[in-house]
Structures are given as structure tokens and as C-alpha cells.
Image: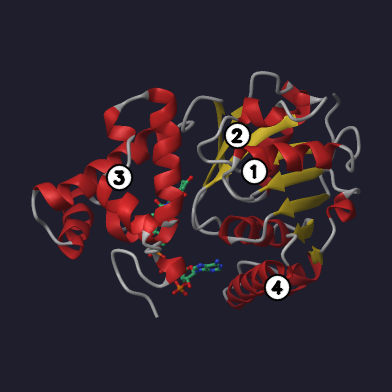
Amino acid sequence: MSAVAVRRIGVVGAGTMGAGIAQLGCAAGFRTLLHDPLPEALEAGERRVRGGLDRWVAKGRADSAAADLLGTVAALDDLAGCELVIEAIVEDLDAKLALFAELEGIVRADTILATNTSALSVTEIASAVETPERVVGMHFFNPAPLMPLVEIVRAELSSDEAVEAAFRFGERLGKRPIRCHDTPGFVVNRVLIPLLNDCLRVLDEARVSPEDLDAAMTAGAGWPMGPCTLVDLVGIDVHVHASEALYEKLREPRMAPPPRIVSMRNAGLLGRKSGRGFYSYD
Ligand code: CAA
């Protein structure tokens, strides 16, 4: 597989992460096509990208022409001309396998296929395609427009060219890319998921309020935001899923989600996105 010059990117999934990645693509001067099969999700994602770009234009962080680079496409086929497609759909292996198999039939032979999965195996996702050397992980952090890191994940069969092209693309987005291998949780979540679960267990063990726990970790450990605020931001469903996926693979008790947040997830208390988690949001 030879190195491909990335000019047009596709982003599949117009949720929080997909919209954030699309915003970064436009701001960095890439023609960016955002796809979501659900029209309402695509519209909401587009609003989010344009809103984020407006804020950046006002601050001089992006050019006013950046928004012209955004296209929304209702059909996956419309991603045919992209040199890089980043998947940011639901964290469900079967859904990702089906998407990658379909994408392979649409894009060019040298198109790089990246997944933003946070807890699934990139190697397993790549098994959906006949050319797994083109598949890599590009794991962004929430909120994607603001968090500098992107983990560039080498799967079992990823080619050097695909890994390096993804790395360079991360740099062109203005991110700080790091290279790592496809192990459960990669780098950050391998450390952060059990740490957040410890924090949430302390809620009950020390009978501390979410406000005081957040104050403890911001004022006492220098975290930029407290663990309850962070889990509300990431999404309690997303955090529970990532914890379960890592626990399933590593069998370390600290990876398992505390029962309290599993109940919150089951009750629809998902954090910011549902309006209620550890805190209430308007
Ligand atoms: N587009 C453009 N601008 C945006 C924006 C967007 N999408 N979102 C926010 N902004 C703006 C804000 O409006 C704000 O502008 P002003 O300064 O003009 O008010 C600016 O960006 C900065 O926002 P904040 O004031 O909220 O910034 P902050 O200094 O408080 O930092 C933060 C925010 C970077 C999120 C910081 O709190 C932080 O680092 N938190 C930790 C987040 C974290 O750990 N994320 C990882 C989660 S784990 C994960 O993602 C992995 C996984 O797989 C689940």
C-alpha cells in the first residue's frame, strides 16, 4: 500500500465525536464529508460543526472559508472520493464490521479506513475487510475540538504507510498524535477508565457528594475537571460500555463499572446528553 495524499475526508457518524472530528477537518483545510444514516442526526451534527467553526472564526482560530469545506451526505456511496474515512459510529462491533465491509466496496483501493473506537479492538474491526492493512485506529478525546491528543493505533495487520499517513493527518489537524498498538483501552483509557471507576467508588465509600469529589480532584490533584463532571461529559453509557469492554478483556476488577453507574445508565441518566447525570443540565 503506497502513501496517499489526504485532501478529502469522510466522517461516518454525526454524533459528538463525529461532529468534533469534522470540525477539526474543516478548520485544517480538508474537504470534509459528514455522513449519518439518520437525517435528524446528520442535521444536528451539521449544526454542531458550524456552531463550533463560528466560535473558532470569531477567535481567529479558523478561517471563515472553513465552513464551506463541510458537506453532509445522506448516502455512504458519496464518500467514494475520500482518501481517508474516519468511523465514529456507535460502539458496537457488529455495526462497525458491517460498516467497514460496506465502505471497502465504495472507496478507492488506497483509501485509509480509521476507527475512532475507544474500547473495541481495531484488529477485530479490520477483519471485516479484505485489505486490513489500510485500517488503523484514530482515537480522539472528548471534546474532540479541544483535546490535543489523538492515539494512532496500529492493528495486527496495519501497514506502516497507513499508520504514518494517519499520524501525519493528526498533526495536520493540529493534534498531538502518539503511536501505540491495539491493546485494550490503548493508552489513555487503559489508565483513565479504572481511575474514573475508583473515583466513582469513592463516592459511596467516603460518602462524599459529586460536587465535593470533583472539588477534591480539581483542587487536590490538579485535574482540569472533576471525575463526575467528566463522566457526565463523556456520557455515562459510553463510560459504562468502555468499562465493560475493558473488564471483559482484562478481567481486572477496577475496570468493571461500579453498580451505581450501571443503574444510572439503565435509568437513562446519561449525563449532559440526556440532561441529567451526576448533575442536571438545561
Ligand atoms: N468548538 C469551538 N470552541 C469550543 C467548542 C467547540 N466544539 N467547545 C468549547 N469551545 C470553546 C468554549 O466556548 C471556550 O471558549 P471561551 O474561552 O471563549 O469561553 C473554549 O473553547 C474553552 O472552553 P472551556 O472554557 O470549557 O475550556 P477549559 O479551559 O475549561 O477546558 C477542557 C475545557 C479542555 C474540556 C478541559 O476541561 C479538559 O481538559 N477536561 C478534561 C477532558 C477529558 O479528560 N477528556 C477525555 C475524556 S475520555 C475520552 O474522551 C476517551 C473516551 O474514549 C471516552
Res. 125 image quadrant: top right
Going 65% across and 38% down the picture, which residue do you hit? 94
- Amino acid tagged 2: Ile
Q: Secondary structure at mark 3?
A: helix
Q: Which residue is mark 1?
A: 170
Going 33% across and 34% down the picture, which residue do you hit? 255
- Within 8 Å of ligand 1, the CB of disc 4? no
Cβ atoms at labels 2 and 4 below 8 Å apart: no
- Amino acid tagged 4: Glu
First in residue order: circle 3 vs circle 4: 4
Q: Which mark is residue 196?
A: 3
Mark 2 is surrounded, within 10 Å at the Cα level, by few (under 14), some (14 to 19) or many (20 or more) other residues, namely: many
First in residue order: circle 1 vs circle 4: 4
The image position of residue 55, as x and y in percent, is: 58, 75
Instruction: Tell me: 146 left or right of 44.
Output: left
Q: Quadrant of the N terminus?
A: top right
Distance between the Cα atoms at labels 3 and 1? 27 Å
Res. 137 image quadrant: top right
First in residue order: circle 2 vs circle 4: 4
Instruction: Single out the residue that lies furthest toward the bottom.
Output: 282
Distance between the Cα atoms at labels 1 and 4? 26 Å
Q: Which residue is mark 4?
A: 43
The image position of residue 72, as x and y in percent, is: 79, 66
Q: Which mark is residue 152?
A: 2
Cβ atoms at labels 2 and 1 below 8 Å apart: yes
First in residue order: circle 2 vs circle 3: 2
Mark 1 is surrounded, within 10 Å at the Cα level, by few (under 14), some (14 to 19) or many (20 or more) other residues, namely: many
- Amino acid tagged 1: Gly
Going 20% across and 45% down the picture, which residue do you hit? 201
Q: Secondary structure at mark 2?
A: strand
First in residue order: circle 2 vs circle 1: 2
